[in-house]
Amino acid sequence: MGQPRACQIIQSAVFRRSSASGAGKQGERNGRLFLFLVCIVLTPMLMVGCSGMKGGFHDKAAFEEANDLFSQGKYQASLDKYEHLIEKEPTARDRVLFEMGIIYSHPKNEHKDYAKSLDCFQKLITGYPGSDYRPNSEMMVFTINNVIFKDRLIAEQQAQIGVLHQEAKGKDNEVATLHQRIMALEQNVLDFATRKRSVDRIVIEKKERRLMLISTGEVLKTYKIALGGNPDGPKERQGDNKTPEGTYVIDGKNKNSQYHQALHVSYPNERDKKRAKELGVSPGGDIMIHGIKTGFSWVGDLQANKDWTKGCIAVTDEEIEEIYKLVPLNTVVEIRP
């Protein structure tokens, strides 16, 4: 046998609202207990049926038709039938009001109306104080009022969340605007500084993953970088995927590199050659400061999130264009651990 309608509406109200309000496991346990107690009260009455109620009624077929319409999900048709029974069966009006109150508040009724549901139950409570349906109507009034309160609370919270989302979006826009202004100011400073003097040193800090352009001891600009895939420690041999550590110079420039543009670093120096000789290995070479591999420029700033080179120092294509323009040959390159 299916659940009585009152149990269905209360079950939906309890579990839907406790979930929406984030009550958690404790709230769910409380909801189950509440549902259990209410159904204990309602089930015996609803299983007895209309004929077992005080006063009885004459048109049993009409009640069965109204109930069948409800079972088929034809809620408005069922309500229309009960409206007709209000006049036709005056001795069963309490039953009719109760049934209509349930239908108006049923969760599957797309046109449910809590105000009309409460009106039905209130009419029953005040007009039929001795009705067997009164205790259950009082319980339904309590339940529906609780649902309305939680609906209002949830709506208010959702509105607050919407406002906070808009505020956060506004802050994001402000941050993006400020970031653009900072970048523009940095570019202005760089342009002004390089008009007066040239870059005389590049400092690369491997641990911090940054490259700095220096002029007479002043940092003109800093870039995020990617290193060799095995970045810890100095480069010792060919193929070890390490980025060198030491002091070098820019001894060549390639404007048509397969990595957009490139500046050649004078690795190996004398110390590197000596170490490799002691180890009986080739020190390797072709260490560059370069951009992103041709065809992958869309990666942009994300290239610095992972060390992906074979020992070179990588920046974005836009950044290598700037570095290429600002750094003359024989500029000192200091690569720190």
Image: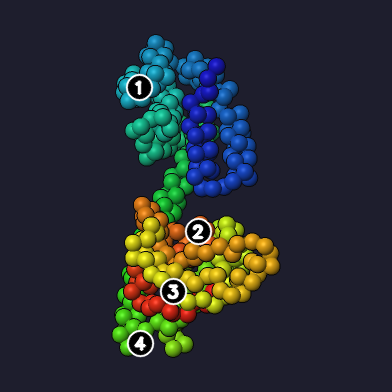
- Give the spatial CA distance, label 1 vs label 4: 85 Å
Up the image or down, 119 lies above or below 154; here it is: above
- Residues under numbered marks 3 and 1 in contact, where contact means CB atoms less than 8 Å apart: no
Q: Nearer the viewer, mark 2 or mark 1?
A: 2
Mark 1 — residue?
A: 74
Q: Residue at x 30, y 85 (%)?
A: 195
Q: Residue at x 35, y 80 (%)?
A: 190
Quadrant (top left, top right, bottom left, bottom right) of the C terminus:
bottom right
Quadrant (top left, top right, bottom left, bottom right) of the N terminus:
top right
Is there any visible trace of residue 84 in the rendered image?
yes
SS state under label 1: loop
Mark 4 — residue?
A: 197
Q: How far across and how far down the image is residue 306, in percent?
A: 51, 58
**Is residue 217 rendered to the left or right of residue 256?**
right
Of mark 2 and mark 3, the one earlier in the sequence is 3
Mark 2 — residue?
A: 309
Q: Amino acid at mark 1?
A: Lys
- Give the spatial CA distance, label 3 vs label 4: 20 Å
For the residue pair 297 and 136, the one nearer the viewer reads as 297
Q: Amino acid at mark 3?
A: Asp
